[in-house]
Image (cartoon, grey):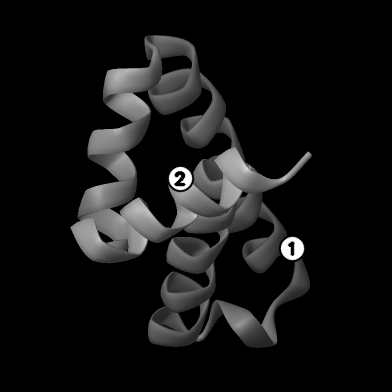
Amino acid sequence: MAVHEGAASYASAACNATGAVDDEATADALYDEAGRQAADDVNNRGLAHQVSYLVAQYGAAEVEHLIREAASTP
């Protein structure tokens, strides 16, 4: 879940930076590509790659918090 949220955050920033936010088809394409990359390039490559991606997106302290939170959720 966190990987997809990170990808969505990246897509959101890209939409705002490029003006795609005003073009629904272009915005959808950016979000679709971010989701595809999250699935294909990150999630499917295993836990170590997922953690590395998340650290790059959020920083080590936030990722530690996310992992601890996930571990404590029943």
Q: Position of residue 64 (x, y in %)?
A: 33, 52
In the figure, residue 14 lies in which quadrant?
Answer: bottom left
Mark 1 or 2 closer to N-term?
A: 1
Name the mark on residue 67: 2
Mark 1 neighbour class, 10 Å CA radius: few under 14, some 14 to 19, many 20 or more: few
Q: CA distance from mark 1 to mark 2?
A: 34 Å
User: Residue 10 or 73: which is nearer the viewer?
Assistant: 73
Residue drawn at (62%, 55%), measured in percent from left and top? 31
Circle 2 SS class: helix
Camera sees residue 20: yes
Amino acid carrying label 2: it is Ile
User: Residue 23 or 11: which is nearer the viewer?
Assistant: 11
* Residue bearing mark 1: 25
User: Residue 65 or 30: which is nearer the viewer?
Assistant: 65
In the figure, residue 23 lies in which quadrant?
Answer: bottom right
Circle 1 SS class: helix
Query: Can you say which quadrant of the picture contains the N terminus?
Result: top right
